[in-house]
Image (tube, rainbow, N blue to C red):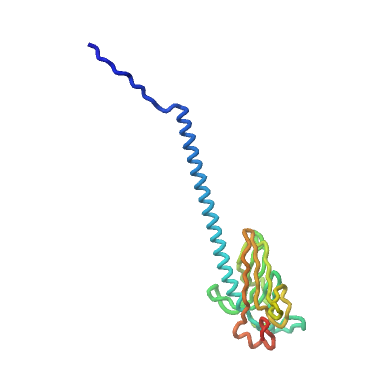
Amino acid sequence: MSARLGPMRREYGFTLVELLVVISLLSLVMLAMGSALRTTAQTEERVDARLQRVDELRVTDSFLRSILGRVSMRKKLTPVSMDESPYFFLGGPQEMVWVGVMPARYGAGGRHYFRLGLEDRVNGKALVLRFLPFMDTGAAPDWGAADSYVLVPFVTSFVLRYEDPSQEPPQWGAPWTPIDRLPQRVAINLQTTLDAWPEIVVPLRVLPGSDASIGGATFGGSR
């Protein structure tokens, strides 16, 4: 007696076309995921760069306020002409020179000569602070021997303005030309290759101990 064979079952698999469709879909999914990850990474890099610039702005702003806000009004020991300021202060549109105090937390504290201005560097212009210890000898400071510190690199525009409160309303401008007083405030406008910085306005306050040589001159328009 012969056994009866049941109906034969046919095993089904993926056809070549179906495999190609699946592979194509997987490729699209992987491409979308890669693009999303790349976009996320680029966004994170931009945010990090922005936060770094904000931090640089905060640090530079704090440092400039600490050194610009304490100005000495000691008179020069050398004779000056009638149309020349007796104070060691130069307020130009792109350079400021003065005697002030270096905060101890930034290095050697005490009274220093300072010069703030643009200088050529390897990667373009930079805002540079030069400084050296104050010597009450009457000799002009040797800026070539001064220490220097790059405050802001890649500068494309740098403008200083000075406030004269003796006029009503107070006037801003540069250079500073009055010879019997110093500005009340200085404004710094700065732009780099990345962005424009907010204007920094710093009140100039006279140093204690420099009043003895002020004589009859005024500071910031007040006696």
Question: Horizontal and vertical percent for residue 35?
Answer: 52, 45
Residue at far left of view: 1
Rendering quarter of residue 203: bottom right
On screen, residue 191 above or below 167: above
Q: Is residue 105 left or right of residue 144?
A: left
Question: x%, y% of residue 134?
Answer: 62, 79
> Is residue 113 shown above or below 59?
below
- Picture layout, residue 204 above or below residue 61: below
Q: Position of residue 95 (x, y in %)?
A: 68, 71
Give 78 or 37, whichever is nearer the viewer: 37
The quadrant the N terminus occupies is top left
- Is residue 88 among the parts visible in the rendering? no
Quarter of the rendering containing residue 89: bottom right
Task: Name the residue: 55% across, 55% down.
Answer: 46
Residue at 65%, 78% (x, y): give it.
184
- Compared with residue 62, is residue 191 higher up or lower down, i.e. above or below? above
Image position, residue 132 (x, y; %): 62, 75
The residue lying at 77 percent from left, 81 percent from top is 83
| Residue at the top extreme, as displayed | 1
The one nearer the camera, 120 or 28, is 28
Residue at image point 54% right, 61% down:
52
Nearer to the camera, 204 or 8: 8
Q: Residue at the right extreme? A: 82
Answer left or right for 12 relative to 189. left
